[in-house]
Every structure is written in C-alpha cells, then in structure tokens.
Image (tube, helix red, strand yellow):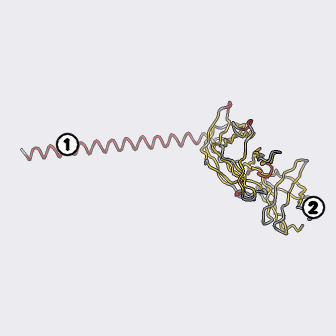
Amino acid sequence: MKKMQLIQNKGLMRNVTRMFFLMTVGLSVLLVSACNKDDENTKEKAHLSVRMTDAPANYDAVLIDLQAVEVTGNNGGLIILNTNAGIYNLLNFSNGLDTLIATGYLDAGTISQIRLILGPDNSVIVDNVAYPLSTPSAQQSGLKLQVHQTFEPGVAYMLLLDFDANQSVILTGNGKYQLKPVIRVIDAALSGSIKGHISPSGIMSMITATSGGISYSSASNATGQFLLPGLPAGIYDVIINPEIPYTQVTITNVAVVTGVSTDLGLIVI
C-alpha cells in the first residue's frame, strides 16, 4: 500500500513539475512576444531627449522647481515625457555644461510646442540671501516654448533648452524678484557655437554675436570663459562688452560651422 502511494505521489510530482514547466515556457513566450511588440512600436516612433543649459548670471544661484515636461504633438495631442523632476540650480549648467531633464517616444510628425511645468519652490540667492521667485499668472499653466519641428520614425533627436538666467530674473520696483523665463530652444545637430576666454578673469562681460541682423548673447563666467551655443552657420561679428573701466572689443568675420565650436582663444580686454 505504501509502495503504491509512493508511486502515486511521484506521478503527482511529475505532473506538477510538467505543469510548472509548461506555465514557465508559456509565460516566457508571452514576455518575449510583449517585448518584441514594444520594440516594433518604438521603431515606428521618434525618440526625444530634452536637455537644459544656461548662460552665466550675476547671482549666487537661480533655483527652479521643475515638475514635468510636456510636448504638443500631432493634432494638438499632449505627450508627457519621462521627466527628471526636481529643483535645479541653473548656474550649474553654463559654458557647455547641460543636464538631461526629460526623454520619451513620440509619434512621427510635427511637434509645435514644449511646455515646462514649474512648481512653487523657485528662488534666487543674492549675496547669500534667498528670495522667492514669483511666477506671473499667465505662466502658471506652464512655460510654453514654440518648436515646430518634424520628427521621423526610428530617429533619436535632442533639443537643448538654453535658459538665460541673467535675463529671466527680474527685480521689481517693490524689491521682490520675479521669474520671467527667457529660454531658447536649440537643435544641437543643426547649429554651431562660439567660445573664448577673456582676460583678466573675474570681470563680468556680455558677449554678443550678430549675423544678418540677428543677435545672440551670453556672459562670461568667473574664470573669464564664455560659450554662445545654438548659432546657425554663418559669419558673425562678436562684441565683448566688459564692466567699466575696461573697454569694448569687437571681432569681425567669425565663421560658425554646423557641429563645430569656433574657438576665439584668449581675448585681452
């Protein structure tokens, strides 16, 4: 009797093992099928990375509370990107430094707008004192940046948001600070840049590059370095305007080539 029961138990174990094996195989097939389906879906979409950079500014820190990044796609549909939400000090990302703030897959076609959703914890630090940065009511629904770019399926794109902190922070008449963001959307693959090093260092200088009547501006940092990103290819006149008592310097016929950073080297003011 015990021998028969043992045989029955062994048979039962074999059946259970066989069922477990079949279930495992079936689940694996489903997972592989799902992965393949996801791969096929993403092949039909464009991949977008959104990065953020900044021009130097005469503050200790400019902190923005980034909550979400949205894209307006075909037919006005909204796509919420995978956003690295958090509080960012814009001054950490200047002169060629940037940070990834959002990624996602988009249907092929034209996007018209990128929208940055900011939280309430925006502030500026001046002489080691923190001041809240209020946001105008018109921008509380998000900072809307016009793009109008066509994306192809299966292609990876990168857009760089050049957040000009120096122009974006406004000191109002009542002594309060207001955030009125000045942001330029740059397609790094379709532009070049101009960089250089101003001597002596420690002198705040505004640098402006002009071509065809259109100007692009930035500022030097504490070590005298500067970068003007996102410049269309062309010939530029570059003006370095330092603090008093230093005098203005003009450099003409500066060539900008797509995908290249034109180095002006050491500029003595």
* Residue at the limit of the structure toward the top, as seen here: 75
The residue labelled by disc 1 is 12
The relative height of residue 71 versus residue 49 in the rendered view (above or below) is above
Residue 176: image location, x then y, percent: 77, 46
Q: Secondary structure at mark 1?
A: helix
SS at mark 2? loop
Where is mark 2, residue-wise? 248
Residue at 89% in and 57% down: 238
Mark 2 Cα within 10 Å, few/some/many (few <14, many 20+)? some
Relative depth, front residue between 141 and 184: 141
The image quarter in which residue 178 lies: top right
Q: Are marks 1 and 2 in contact (CB under 8 Å)?
A: no
Q: Position of residue 78 (x, y in %)?
A: 64, 34
**Residue 262 in picture, x, y percent from top left:** 81, 60
Q: How many marks do you count on the picture? A: 2
Left or right, 78 with reference to 232: left
Disc 2 residue type (three-letter):
Gln
